[in-house]
Image (spheres, grey):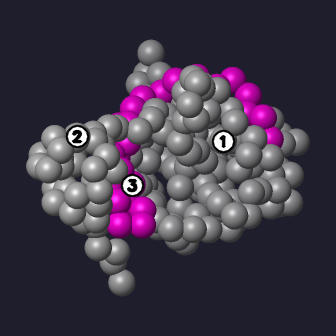
Amino acid sequence: MAETINNDFLFCPKCGGKNVQYADDRKWNCPDCGFKLYNNVAAAVGLVITDEKGGVIFEVRAKEPKKGFLALPGGFCDPGETAEEAAVRECREELGVEPEKVSYLCSFPNIYDYKGIRYKTCDLFFVAKMGLSKSASLVDSMHIQDTEVTKLVSKQVYSESDIDKLPLAFESAKKTLRFWLSSAKADKQE
């Protein structure tokens, strides 16, 4: 059953009034005291990690939203952290390994529905590689953060048709894989 997203607060965090309204798809207003709380875009990161066979490493999500769907490793940026630091930390936390040669790829807006609140995110994606010993042991040993990830899988992604067949949790990952694929093809033509 789909979760109802209403972005409602029952009470104003400033005056306790019960008339809080979600306006303009981006802020809460309290007509009683004039308080405004903005639902700003959150920064999140993801990694397109390729193994020694050219496969892309995906996580099977262990929790909502989109439990059971495939996702690229990643998560929200912590306060005081750069996007690059967040990408490395998320890889370390979720996969138990340090990625190699991390470089920026692209960004896309995304929606993250969680516990009745719709969070708007700007997802910044990076590419990284795993050495032969790391990637082989990673998928085989399941050295993962089990509260976030059920298992890891490596999938070959050669075409948009391959991407469309993947049960991806987030639209931004689908757009990123298409961008990554077209970038890789452009690099081969140069």
Residue 164 image position (x, y, % from top left): 38, 59
Q: Is residue 67 left or right of residue 112?
A: right
Q: Quadrant of residue 168?
A: bottom left
Which quarter of the rendered picture does the C terminus lie within? top left
Q: Main secondary structure of the magenta part?
A: strand
Q: Amino acid at mark 3?
A: Tyr
Q: Residue at x 29, y 73 (%)?
A: 4
Give the crowd class for mark 3: few <14, some 14-19, many >=20 residues within 10 Å.
some
For marks 3 and 2, give the CA distance.
22 Å
Q: Is residue 166 magenta?
A: no
Q: Is the residue 155 above or below the residue 123 in the image?
A: below
Give the crowd class for mark 1: few <14, some 14-19, many >=20 residues within 10 Å.
many
Q: Residue at x 14, y 50 (%)?
A: 32
The first of marks 1 and 3 along the sequence is 1
Query: Which mark is in front, 1 or 2?
Result: 2
Q: Which residues are magenta?
A: 97-122
Residue 92 image position (x, y, % from top left): 75, 41
The first of marks 3 and 2 along the sequence is 2
Q: Amino acid at mark 2?
A: Lys
For marks 1 and 3, give the CA distance.
17 Å
Q: Which residue is mark 2?
A: 36
Question: In this rendering, does residue 139 appear at all?
Answer: no
Q: Is residue 89 left or right of residue 182?
A: right
Q: Quadrant of residue 176?
A: top left
